[in-house]
Amino acid sequence: MQLDLLNIAAIPLDIAQADKQANLNAAEKAIGQLGREIDLVVLPELFSTGYINDHDALIELSETNSGSTVARMKEMAKQYGVAITGSFLARIGGELRNRAFFIEPSGEEAFYDKAHLFGISQESRDLHGGEQQSPIVRYRGWNIAMIVCYDLRFPVWCRNVGNSYDLMVVPANWPESRSYAWHQLLIARAIENQAYVVGANRGGEDRFGVYPQSMTQIYDFAGKPIGAASDDVVTATIDRAALSEARRKMPVSADADTFTIDPRYPKRTL
């Protein structure tokens, strides 16, 4: 199936700290209320657990790709006919990862591990960062890339080489105290990559800050906000024809620099 218009819902879920069952139930309730016209749902970063500073609790809450979080996402995707993306606390062998997922109604799945761990928090000490960029997911005719929260600050990592993606999704736990940077970075990534960008931030509050719904937003390829907020969800319709015309009129990808990733990260390649 190829759609010229893709309907997106970003849900600023108010995450219950370390209560996986409550968060999965809340996500299902929110998704169930969206209606059949939605094609893609974007949930926040670590939506099923929230951030945890206790290492033993992290290990206990972590799970594999076949654990309860991904299994429940597959059930919801199939039941409601939508693709679902977000991130969860993953355990890969002996390592903990902040792992983004993309689950299609068919059950197809793709994963990306957050590469840039927040250096002034416990995350950078408890978790392992990913070394590979997001796979490009082909969904209903759209090419979609994933990053997670702090990755947003690193434009080279997000670079849309050869217009390889049309849409970037950004699940996040970004506090209101840094909201100005959040919005400017989302806008910048949209403009420089000529791609739609969905910033799905968590809602509510925790020990790290407050997360108002207004921080969840969807931007078009020109960096203009197109999200409409109502009933704890932000929705937008993205348009393939408009994106193609913008790229035709201003083919910046053809003039982009060639570059390499920072040598401090030799395993990261473009």
Image: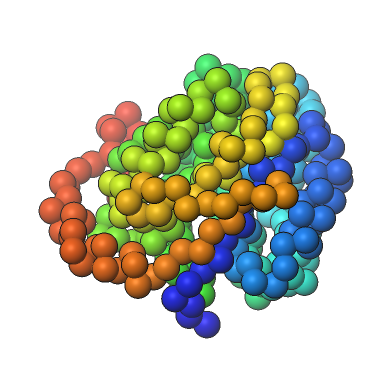
Instruction: Report if residue 110 is visible in the image.
Output: no
Q: Residue at x 35, y 72 (%)?
A: 241
Q: Position of residue 232 (x, y in %)?
A: 71, 46
In front: 134, or 33? 33
Residue in front for this viewpoint, 18 or 237: 237
Splitting the image into 4 quarters, where does residue 62 fall? top right
Instruction: Give the vertical position of 248 relative to 30 (above or below).
Output: below
**Residue at horizontal 58%, vertical 25%?**
176
In this picture, residue 161 sits left or right of residue 220: left
Where is residue 49? Give x, y as percent: 75, 37
> 56 or 257: which is nearer to us?
257
> Taking 190 as reference, is 32 left or right?
right
Query: How are the residues colored?
Result: rainbow
User: Horizontal and vertical percent for residue 45?
Assistant: 62, 41
Task: Give whichever of 217, 197 is nearer the camera.
Answer: 217
- Please identify the quarter of the rendering in which residue 59 is found: top right
Q: In the displayed structure, does residue 94 sit left or right of residue 197?
A: right
> Along the horizontal axis of the image, is 164 left or right of 150?
left
Q: Residue sitting at 61 percent across and 33 percent down? A: 173
Q: Position of residue 169 (x, y in %)?
A: 50, 51
At x 69%, y 36%, the residue is 203
Q: Is residue 259 visible?
A: yes
Q: Establish if 227 lies above or below 90.
A: below
